[in-house]
Image: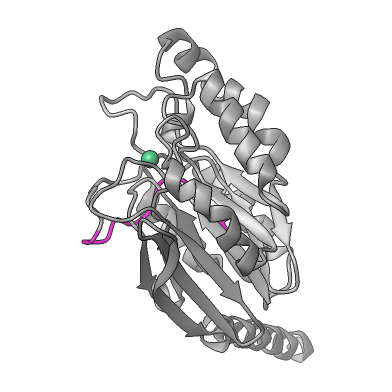
Amino acid sequence: MTSILHFADIHFGVEDQSALAKLGATIDKLEPDISVISGDITQTGSEEEFARAAEWIAGLAGPKVITAGNHDTPMYGIIDRMMKPFDRYADYIDPLDIGLFEDENVIIQSMNTARGVQMKLDWSVGVVDLDRLDTVIARFHESDWNKLRLLNVHHPFIYPPESPLQKTTDNGPEALKRLADGNCDMVLSGHVHVPFVVERKPGGSELLSVSSGTLSTRRRDNNPAFNHIAVTADELVITMIEFDGEGFVRSEAFRKPRHELSAWRRDGYETMRKKAKILDTQPLREP
Ligand SMILES: [Fe+2]
């Protein structure tokens, strides 16, 4: 079994200290193999917030795959925000990030969808660099076909009705299409501060969009929360875990048999190979 912790929007500076104080014992019970953090690690991108965030992340046992959010650029200091938006993030967080995680069940990669400044009024909007996305998909293709492929981003590519925030990530629809065509299984995100799982079947393939809640005090009618994702040889189980004021409790769970996620892909691959063989062995006819 691969045990994945999925956090987002801890927003050090306005983190929920009572929730974080109880988190350690819960994490120990879940025996994580990997922690995924989907951005907005800080509130204003200050040195002090990054230092505290880095200390907390370093204290999490095991490897981490991390990406930045729009709050992880300097909120104060427009020159820094324009010229070197992710320098502090690089100083404090990059050394804690293994970049890519792969075991017998999953492969996980990150992609930064946050920007310092943009040619639009709302700088919090996410942007997908499609060339970078193609590189990520190409790396997925290098791994075994039966491993689940997870992409970690800050901004969701889809905003379901239960999201209190309704925006469009630039190139989000095209990114979803390329990921589905590229046989990606799951997009892990944050940003909206509300947990959700959305199942889609674009083009006959299957792609899950999974959002973590927040562990900050910036909540939108939800308890502080994070996700636990368990992947076995047979099943995928995504459990939302929320803080009820006293401790962390399991709330909703989403279950899916593994064969429904990856069997079509293996079959598709084998069919392609069979077809290729048939083509290979067909005698070339003289015109
Ligand atoms: Fe956030």
Q: Report which quarter residue 150 is drawn in.
A: bottom right
Residue sitting at 72 percent across and 35 percent down?
95
x then y, percent, for residue 111:
56, 45
Q: Main secondary structure of the magenta part?
A: loop
Q: Nearer the viewer, residue 110 or 223?
A: 223
Residue 123's place in the image compared with 155, above or below, is above
Residue 199's place in the image compared with 35, above or below, is below
Residue 98 visible in the displayed image: yes
Question: Is 213 a magenta residue?
Answer: no
Which image quadrant: the N terminus? Answer: bottom right
Which image quadrant: the C terminus? Answer: bottom right
Q: Nearer the viewer, residue 33 or 94?
A: 33
Residue 212's place in the image compared with 231, above or below, is above
Residue sitting at 64 percent across and 62 percent down?
28
Q: Nearer the viewer, residue 29 or 49?
A: 29
Range of magenta residues? 151-162
Residue 13's place in the image compared with 131, above or below, is above
